[in-house]
Image (cartoon, coloured by chain):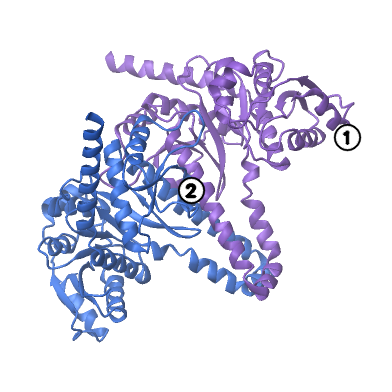
Chain colours: A purple, B blue
Amino acid sequence: LAQICTIAVDVMSGDHGPRVCVPAALAMLREHEHLQLVLVGAADDIAARVRADGCEDHPHLSIHPATQVVAMDEPPREALRRKKDSSLRQSIELVKAGRAAACVSAGNTGALMAMAHFVLKPLPGVERPAIVSALPSTAGHTHMLDLGANTVCTAGQLFQFGVMGAVVASGQAVLERPRVGLLNIGEEDIKGHETVRDAHRRFAASGLNYIGFVEGDDIFSGEVDVVVTDGFTGNVALKTIEGTARMIGAVMREEFTRGAARKLMAAAARPALMALKQRLDPRQYNGASMVGLNGIVIKSHGGADQTAFAYAIRTAAREAARGVPARIVEELRREDQALEQQVMQAES
Amino acid sequence: LAQICTIAVDVMSGDHGPRVCVPAALAMLREHEHLQLVLVGAADDIAARVRADGCEDHPHLSIHPATQVVAMDEPPREALRRKKDSSLRQSIELVKAGRAAACVSAGNTGALMAMAHFVLKPLPGVERPAIVSALPSTAGHTHMLDLGANTVCTAGQLFQFGVMGAVVASGQAVLERPRVGLLNIGEEDIKGHETVRDAHRRFAASGLNYIGFVEGDDIFSGEVDVVVTDGFTGNVALKTIEGTARMIGAVMREEFTRGAARKLMAAAARPALMALKQRLDPRQYNGASMVGLNGIVIKSHGGADQTAFAYAIRTAAREAARGVPARIVEELRREDQALEQQVMQAES
């Protein structure tokens, strides 16, 4: 981060609320001198926690009061109507007002999506905002979208996801031309449904670094940087990854603690086990981005601990520094113009 | 297996052909006295391998000649037209003729599906055959379908998958009323698309032990026995599971062999690592079933080794012993009648 960047942090939401979110924010503040944070929520509670941490005079810290909290199971429609002074809503409003470059919340996904959509509106040219996140791969990480915002998508929407995903992926690493792949199934005779085939043609005609269809196991291969799919398939894939990793972890724990001899071995293997745990730590992938909106909104896992929530704040700072929304508008415009030219050339 | 059951084994297909398939079949024959196998393919080659293994006089072994082999990348349409004397086609024909209760092949999925569909035809009442397989879970295993036969499915088809999956799951364990779940995404406001919601209502009104919507990570939770989804989502989920497990395995190998000290620790932890490997060994889940056809067809992974291919033969024998196709017809009929009654009661 080269210049000061202000992030609004909803510290009231998630399973743990201010107990976890405030210390995570303060830790980030101490580590990153260019970061400026606005903690949004119950002002007295937050101020007390900030004081307890000795940060009350930090020049890059302010508190923005919000009297309500959106419950984790609150229907988004209700939250939209009744929770105008919630920490979640106010964090988004700070972005809308230009007082923060991005916001972060561990709140209820549906409510966050609904409020962000309502307050910030989609970017010009964007049909549907989508949820994108980084996932671990054997070589660094892969971005996947949509992870659940749109259960049914058109080919054109899938294409836009690809453009947006490429902007996010190139913003998070040195990748100048991220490799974009379209998720499909590999059985020979049955290469996907019509929407996927139509999207494939649109991608192939684009200026993106499109590598074609990819399958579920390619997400981790290191051979693709952006995996595009509809929100139904993407959400199922995401949860399936989490479930598989959790199951393997559970079986591992069982096998490494079965009896005294095994426990001793596990102690000996501790360096390798710890390194393994660290490399696959899902917390470092916390922070999904709602791309395609006129502002940056980062969704943290509801159950995020301090380390995980700090990662979500980092994701927000990165996207803000790269100016992701403006770049999305630019890239979509470029693609539209290129398509128009192709059509005109074909006609002449 | 209480009574003799005959399985036709295509020993020519897959990445390894007779070199792996013949020994796998002979090993199964030695282990299971009620198994009767017909090895289908190049008669001379098979006979030589059987002799080399000392099995030429085995009373439960016969060879059925087939002069052609379907290539792993052969278009299904071509295979259907030109490979009538292939080991794959002839294995299915043996089932059709009633000379085998089931067949097994490691061949090209598209060709196997096309030929099985053409030769055996769907069971009365079945709209679409589907691919089902067992997957590991923390408590035994879970069946999932469709894994790729139907990219787009109606609610009624999803419901039939549930009925068929329940028959297969109750056939493979002591589960008398397998718990059936419908795969969906969990974001609060956006509980899936219309097809899934329609299927949900059909399931809820059925005689199945339906537990409602499940998410990707529930596949492994041990709280559901049959996970129902369309073939697109199912295939993506399956490949994602494989990819996740492979990535974790690769990272584990790296971390346990990083330097001499780590290698020594890995040697000490060998019992735990071996137990882990065995519990998660994907080979024991080899053998996907094409359910809904007038006959039992089991698809082995193309790359299956001897152990994995033997598991596929075992799956075939189990389904044959349980009479899966007849039970599917019966259960579908029962569900149709129950639905009719409900409609009549609602009208009167």
User: Relative to residue B318, is residue A327 depicted above or below?
Assistant: above
Position of B337 compared to A149: left or right? left
Q: Amino acid at mark 2?
A: Asp
Position of B85 compared to B274: left or right? left
Please give the name of the residue rendered at 54% of the width and 70% of the height, measured from the top-left corner: B275
- Residue B91 location in percent, x, y? 17, 64
- Residue A228 location in percent, x, y? 45, 35
Position of A117 compared to B4: left or right? right
Q: Residue furthest front?
A: B348
Nearest the eye: A56 or A269: A56
Q: Secondary structure at mark 2?
A: helix
The circle drawn on residue A155 is none
Task: State whether residue B111 appears in this view.
Answer: no
Q: Are marks 2 and 1 on the same chain?
A: no
**Quarter occupied by residue A16:** top right
- Residue A13 location in percent, x, y? 68, 31
User: Relative to residue A128, is residue A283 depicted above or below?
Assistant: below
Please give the name of the residue rendered at 23% of the width and 81% of the height, measured from the top-left corner: B50
Report which residue position mark 1 lands on.
A52
Say few, some or many: other residues with alpha carbon within 10 Å of mark 2 (under 14 / 14 to 19 / 20 or more). many
Report which residue position mark 2 lands on.
B218
> Can you say which quadrant of the picture contains the C terminus of chain B?
top left
Please give the name of the residue rendered at 71% of the width and 27% of the height, measured from the top-left corner: A9
Indicate the chain on which mark 2 is placed: B
Q: Secondary structure at mark 1?
A: helix
Nearest the eye: B267 or A177: B267
Say few, some or many: other residues with alpha carbon within 10 Å of mark 1 (under 14 / 14 to 19 / 20 or more). few
- Residue B276 location in percent, x, y? 54, 66
**Quarter occupied by residue A264:** bottom right
Q: Amino acid at mark 1?
A: Ala
